[in-house]
Each structure stands twice: as structure tokens, then as C-alpha cells.
Amino acid sequence: MGTALKLGHVCQYARCTGRRLLSSTQGTTALPYDVIVVGGGHAGTEAACAAARMGVQTLLVTHKFETIGEMSCNPSFGGIGKGHLMKEIDALDGVCARICDKSGIQYRILNKKKGPAVWGPRAQIDRMLYKKHIQEEVKTTANLAIEVSPVEDLILKTATHPSHDLMKQECCGVKLGDGKEIYSKTVILTAGTFLRGSINIGLDVIPAGRLGDQPAIGLAKSIENAGFTMGRLKTGTPPRLDGKTIDFSKTEIKYGDDPPEPFSFINDQVWLKASDQVICHMTRTNERVDRICMETLHLNRHVHEEVNGPR
Ligand SMILES: Cc1cc2nc3c(=O)[nH]c(=O)nc-3n(C[C@H](O)[C@H](O)[C@H](O)COP(=O)(O)OP(=O)(O)OC[C@H]3O[C@@H](n4cnc5c(N)ncnc54)[C@H](O)[C@@H]3O)c2cc1C
């Protein structure tokens, strides 16, 4: 739909600078931004907020306002590895850890019986709350504007100060779905699973950025035209189970920590009481499940055809 948010909305979503007003009223941008971030997922919201915190004029361009901060897969954050990453970003005043402290429904430090090097902070998150809070954060961050639109192309020019023989071109802006061009000194791409993405369900292949979202075809082409080779990584989605079909008496109960430990160094406590945390239930596969999986592998393209990726 091109620029889905008209000027009034755009101004509402972030503090509007003269620079942004100019770009919105003229159809094409007159003044460049310092930074354009493409994609409002986890990486994009961190990148956009980080740039804006440094005091530079930043524009976040993303498909839909309502999917900013969408949790695509598991409704959880952290664990060993990712939990450490979140802490490191938090130490740089990142947003994710703080928002997790406002939207978690169960907090646990994994591996607590082992040494501190392998402790992994992990929280089950209410994905609606997470989105609500992160959208609020992005809306109210100074120096950060939001443009709701697909980015279809990158604007490239001959590199003025190449730092390498192979550096022939540099990116100086983006072209939106409606043809509007927005210029900037730096463009950061955080398109997640969207670049010519597809979903495999059984033997069906559906072009999609993720369920319910179109893939980013134009931007993928643009990256290829710029000389980059595109590869594909594979995600694995945990099955969604209907709670009414589960016999919870046969599962192992996992309680949240008491007290729940916040993700962010800035917080002394999380938003909910220890006793208000939800209970998690754990179960294990058995030989019968193994057999069913092995017997139906041929019905699962995800496993037997798509071999790329870390999983
Ligand atoms: C079903 C599913 C299951 C997954 N399971 C796991 C898992 O178990 N573990 C794991 O680590 N990861 C998993 N992932 C990957 C998951 O997407 C990433 O971990 C995480 O979301 C990446 O964050 P991101 O910010 O890079 O991208 P995303 O969260 O994908 O965000 C990308 C954003 O960019 C926007 N965008 C993309 N292209 C354009 C464009 N051209 N113009 C404008 N906006 C654009 C999109 O609208 C979106 O808002 C899964 C993904 C899916 C879809």
C-alpha cells in the first residue's frame, strides 16, 4: 500500500523534526537522514533506538507499525547464548532487556546448578505486551522517525572514498513501494526472514516473510544486483499445541524463579510478583514419537529437502 501512514500519523508516532516534515510533505525527501534502518523486528528496533540515542537523525522503515517488535517464533527471550547477548546489548542501554522486564510471564535462570559462566537468563514472554511496550518505546524515542512502507530498492552511487578495491558502490538511501526516495548517510538492513522468504508446511512451500506477511522480493533483488550472493538459513518452529488436548498431570512442572531476576541491569525487579508467574510444563518424546516422526519424514520438505542453515 505504499506509505500507509499519512503525515498526521507519522508525526504522532515520533517527535517530528523539520527534516521528516519535509520528506513527508514533498513526496520525495529533500534532506537526508543520518541513518535509515530497514525492518522493525528485534534487530531493527535495537539498531534504530541505538542510532537515535547517539543523537543522529534516524528513520525506521518497516512494513507495518503493528508488527514492530513482533515475536516471530517462540514466545520466549534469552537462554544460554542469547541471554548473554541480551545482557551485552542492555549494557549499551539497549531496549530488549528492559522491555522483557515489563512483559515476561515467567522468569528463570537456566543452569543455576552449574557455574555462573553457563547461567542463562530466560523469560517466557506475553508477545502482545512485548509488542505494545516496544512500540511505545520506538514511538517516544527522540531523533527517531517511523515510515510505514516496504523498501523495494536501495539507492546506490559510485563509492566516493572506497576503503577496499572491491568497494565500487555505496548505499545512500532507499526507494519505497510507492517510488518515494529517502536519502541517508547510512542504511542498515535488518530484514530478518523476509528476503525472498518462504514457509514450508509439510510438502507445501508458501512465499512469505513469516506467517501472514509477504516476503521482501524487491529488496532481495536489489541486494543481488549490488553484487551480493543470497543464501538461505532455516528456522525451526515449535509446534503450537492446543492446551485442552494435553494431560498436564503427566508433565513435569517448571516454576519461575522466586524472586524473578530482571534481564536489565537497570531494574531491581520485574513487573509481576513471583507468585503471579505462569507455570511451564515439560515433557519428553519417547520411542513411539520417534517412530511416528521417522515414518512421516517423507511428508516434511523442511527436513528432507531444505538442508541449508544452522538447524
Ligand atoms: C516461524 C518462525 C520461527 C522461527 N523460529 C526461530 C527460533 O526458534 N529461534 C530463532 O533464533 N529464530 C527463529 N526465527 C527467526 C526469527 O525471525 C529471528 O530470530 C528474529 O525474529 C530475527 O529478528 P530480526 O529483527 O532480524 O527480523 P524479524 O523479526 O524477522 O523482523 C524483520 C522486520 O523487517 C521488516 N522488513 C523486512 N523486509 C522489509 C522491507 N523490504 N521493507 C520494509 N520492512 C521490511 C519486516 O516487516 C519485519 O518487521 C523464526 C522465524 C519464524 C518466521
Image (spheres, rainbow, N blue to C red):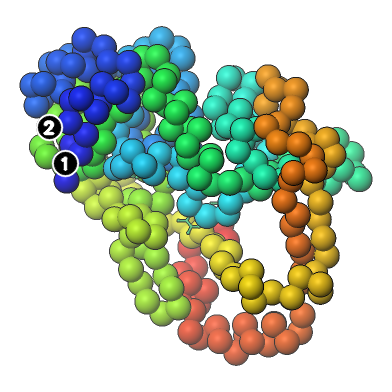
Quarter of the rendering containing residue 169: top left
User: Does residue 218 sit above or below 49 in this rendering?
Assistant: below
Residue 259 higher or lower than 209, as above or below: above
> Gap between marks 2 and 1, in whole Å?
9 Å
The residue shown at (45%, 23%) is: 49
Q: Which residue is mark 2?
A: 180
Q: Which residue is mark 1?
A: 2
Q: Is residue 237 visible?
A: yes
Name the quadrant of the C terminus. bottom right
Residue 148: give x, y in percent of width and height. 26, 36
- Is 75 above or below relative to 25? below
- In which quarter of the view is residue 82 placed? top right
Amino acid type at circle 2 is: Lys
Residue at coordinates 79% horizontally, 46% vertically from top-left?
256
Nearer to the camera, 115 or 121: 121
Task: Classify 10 Å Cα crowding around label 2: few (below 14), some (14-19), many (20 and above).
Answer: some
Residue 27 in percent (x, y) is at 9, 26
Say which element carries label 2.
loop
What's under tag 1, amino acid-wise? Gly
Q: Residue at the spot x=59%, y=71% of the render?
A: 242
Q: Nearer the viewer, mark 2 or mark 1?
A: 1
Element assignment for label 1: loop
Residue 129 appears left or right of 209: right
Instruction: Tell me whether the residue at label 2 lies in contact with that at label 1, contact meaning CB atoms closer than 8 angstroms.
Output: yes
